[in-house]
Amino acid sequence: MFVNNTVQAEATVDLQNKQSEIQSKRSAVQANLSEAESKIVEVMVDLKKLNKKIEQVDHALKQNQEKMNETKSEIEDKKAGIKALEDEIKDLEKEIEARYEILKERIVSYQKSGGDIGYMDVIFGSKSFGELISRVTAVNKITNADAELMKEQEKAKNEVEDKQEKVEGKLTALQDIKVELEGMEETILVQKEQNGEAKDELKNKKQDLEVMKDELEIKDSSLAVIEAEVNQNIAQKNIERERATAAAEEETETVSSNDDDSSNLATLGSESSDASSNSNSDEKSTTSKSSNDTKKQEAKSSTSVAKAPGGGIATAINAGYPHLGTPYVWNGESPSGFDCSGFIAWAFRQGGISLPSSTSALQNVGQKVSYSDIQPGDLVFFNTYKTNGHIGIYVGGGKFIGAQNSTGLAVADMTSGYWDSKFAGHVRRVR
């Protein structure tokens, strides 16, 4: 009987070790399951953000395309106006030429009929129609009809000059519009690329989510198998314990007492092992939580904004931070969409400061200061598709906040890379 009890005790210890091993595997599977579920939640959050970003970019793209269509239509109108003016100029030039031929015929006729040679010298020595009229009037040798014809000729010539000036003015305006159109086309191209990249990223996220779901199902199946194994082993353990108890009842009270002590010691060993395992698990969980909290605090600290001047300027500097990521919209002046100058006007308006909303006007506001004296809140200009084609608000540390066509509203580094190459030192201070 002593041998049987020893074997039974060893079997119990082996079973307890097996149970502990299975429980450890089960804990690992449950941890993996929890991790997978957490990742799925994170992916769903990312999917939601990406969908919102795509909607914003699509909306901005639609607005910019509408503006481009309006600009193209305006260019066509300008071209039509220029064509009409050119046609009018041609008609006037024909009229001038016709009058000139009439005048020549009259002069020749006058000469043939015995006109004064000195008078002819006056006429043919004139360098312009105005000088011709002055000379003819001076010698008082011209008929009223000829004088009226010459006045019409001079008037027509002045009209031609006026219309030519208008044509040149419209051509200049057309050129300015073309420059703006090039900027719009660049913006739309960048936004299309952004949209495509975002959609590709969304597609990849969905694929990752499907893979996670498949892995989760496999882990669930594994967990079910392990749970069944645990239950089976527990049932077997109970049966063996019942048999051991029945056998022990046939022994003397002393032997029974010894068997009970052995069983209690085994149970205490199991409980001690479980307590130690739980204690280690709690300690690791606490350490992990502390580490995560520290990282979050460090991440939060790293996004702090450079200290800005007080008053309205500070408000203007910080106004855009809650709206980082807002898409770039041509002529946009609200958190639903900004362009670079529209953001400047909106941000300073939050601080009670009124500024224009175009780069051409903003390049003359306030006081120009040296880059070496730059302060947070100063306006910084960049030569992109034209001189002073982009503008932002300096926030300190060599960075500025502005509405970029590639990133939307964002904080960018102006001390290296693209923006460093486009910055020519133009800084203005508004106070």
Image (spheres, helix red, strand yellow):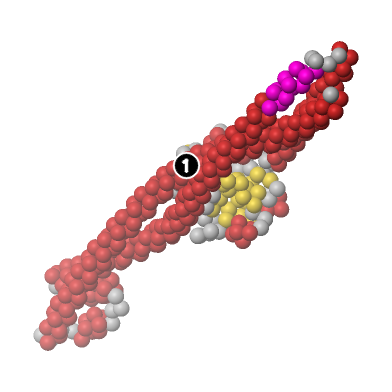
Look at the numbered disc 1 and give the secondary structure of its residue.
Answer: helix
- Asked if residue 342 can be seen in this view, the reply is no
Relative horizontal placement of residue 423, taking residue 11 as reference (left or right) = left
Task: Give the main secondary structure, helix, strand or loop, of the magenta stretch.
Answer: helix
Relative horizontal placement of residue 350, taking residue 117 as reference (left or right) = right
Residue 219 falls in which quadrant of the image? top right
Residue under the image location 68 percent in, 30 percent down: 233
Residue 281 falls in which quadrant of the image? top right
Residue under the image location 57 percent in, 41 percent down: 218
Residue under the image location 28 percent in, 71 percent down: 130
User: Which quadrant is home to the C terminus?
Assistant: top right
Q: Is residue 127 above or below residue 18?
A: below
Label 1 amino acid? Answer: Asn
Percent x, y for residue 240? 73, 25
Foreground of the two, 219 or 138: 219
Q: Is residue 171 above or below residue 57?
A: below
Foreground of the two, 253 or 312: 253
Residue 241 sits inside the magenta stretch: yes
Relative horizontal placement of residue 258, taking residue 312 as reference (left or right) = right
Total count of labels: 1
- Asked if residue 298 can be seen in this view, the reply is yes
User: Which quadrant is home to the N terminus?
Assistant: top right
Q: What segment carries the magenta color?
A: 236-248
Q: Which residue is mark 1?
A: 51
Q: Is residue 66 above or below residue 100?
A: above
Percent x, y for residue 350? 55, 34
Percent x, y for residue 172? 39, 62
Outermost residue toward the top in this view: 253
Percent x, y for residue 5? 83, 25
Q: Is residue 282 above or below residue 180?
A: above
Residue 71 sits inside the magenta stretch: no
